[in-house]
């Protein structure tokens, strides 16, 4: 049993964090920022689109309970990896589809996985998910952690997050913790 980490971005981190926090084997899913040039960025700075950071979720998981390929399957189902620097109405480089690799082996795995998705024709458009080296992770402000579960009636949560989570729960039911 070894604790592993995976850091990824697929648009607004509220959706990604809410989904991964329910997966068996995931010990934590923390919303944050990675990949930019500003030290200790705030949410307001990230939203400007000028810091180079992406909204990400850093996932710690037990590799004997869930493997990284299963997590990649979930990731590529939760968002549209063919939209460049956006997810739906969220537009800007902070919403880019990105996988941060921590080793050459991980980079190769990510490259191979995207090639397999492309070859299988899963998406109608080319996958634009970027692969970037792991950088400094900055946890997002406390109010972002568990945002969907703390604010289920908020309009964005109702219109954007909830439908994604319902699809996720139906598609990956066997991977979810029992309530």
Image (cartoon, helix red, strand yellow):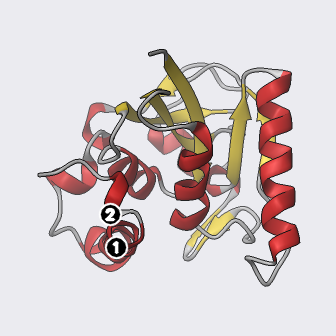
Which element type, helix, strand or loop, lies under badge 2?
Answer: helix
Q: Callout 1: few (<14), some (14-19), or many (20+) C-alpha neighbours within 10 Å?
A: few
| Horizontal and vertical percent position of residue 155 | 25, 74
Q: Which residue is mark 2?
A: 173
Q: Residue furthest bottom?
A: 124
Residue 67 falls left or right of residue 92: left
Q: Quadrant where the N terminus lies?
A: top left
Q: Nearer the viewer, residue 29 or 155?
A: 29
Q: Is residue 169 above or below residue 123?
A: above
Q: Residue at x 58, y 34 (%)?
A: 7
Q: Is residue 75 above or below residue 63?
A: below
Q: Is residue 28 above or below residue 17?
A: above
| Horizontal and vertical percent position of residue 129 | 77, 55
Which element type, helix, strand or loop, lies under badge 1?
Answer: helix
Please give the count of numbered marks on the rendered protein. 2
Q: Are marks 1 and 2 in contact (CB under 8 Å)?
A: yes
| Real-space Cα separation, disc 1 to disc 2, in angstroms | 6 Å
Q: Which residue is mark 1?
A: 170
Q: Nearer the viewer, residue 167 or 39?
A: 167
Q: Residue at x 35, y 46 (%)?
A: 23
| Horizontal and vertical percent position of residue 92 | 67, 60
Q: Nearer the viewer, residue 57 or 143?
A: 57
Q: Residue furthest top?
A: 2
Residue 122 falls left or right of residue 8: right
Residue 133 falls left or right of residue 142: right
Q: Residue furthest left?
A: 179
| Horizontal and vertical percent position of residue 70 | 55, 48
Q: Is residue 124 above or below residue 111?
A: below
Q: Residue at x 51, y 64 (%)?
A: 78
């Amino acid at each position: 049993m070894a604790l592993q980490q995976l850091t990824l971005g697929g648009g607004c981190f509220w959706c990604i964090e809410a989904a991964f926090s329910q997966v068996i084997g995931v010990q934590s899913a923390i919303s944050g920022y990675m990949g930019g040039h500003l030290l200790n960025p705030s949410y307001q700075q990230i939203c400007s689109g000028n810091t180079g950071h992406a909204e990400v979720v850093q996932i710690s998981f037990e590799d004997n309970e869930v493997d990284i390929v299963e997590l990649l399957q979930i990731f590529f189902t939760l968002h549209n990896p063919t939209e460049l620097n956006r997810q739906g109405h969220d537009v800007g480089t902070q919403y880019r589809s990105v996988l941060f690799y921590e080793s050459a082996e991980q980079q190769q795995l990510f490259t191979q996985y995207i090639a397999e998705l492309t070859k299988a024709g899963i998406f109608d458009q080319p996958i634009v998910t970027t692969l970037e080296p792991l950088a400094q992770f900055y946890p997002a402000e406390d109010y972002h952690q568990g945002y969907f579960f703390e604010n289920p009636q908020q309009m964005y949560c109702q219109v954007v997050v909830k439908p994604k989570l319902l699809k996720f729960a139906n598609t990956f039911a066997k991977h979810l913790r029992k309530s």
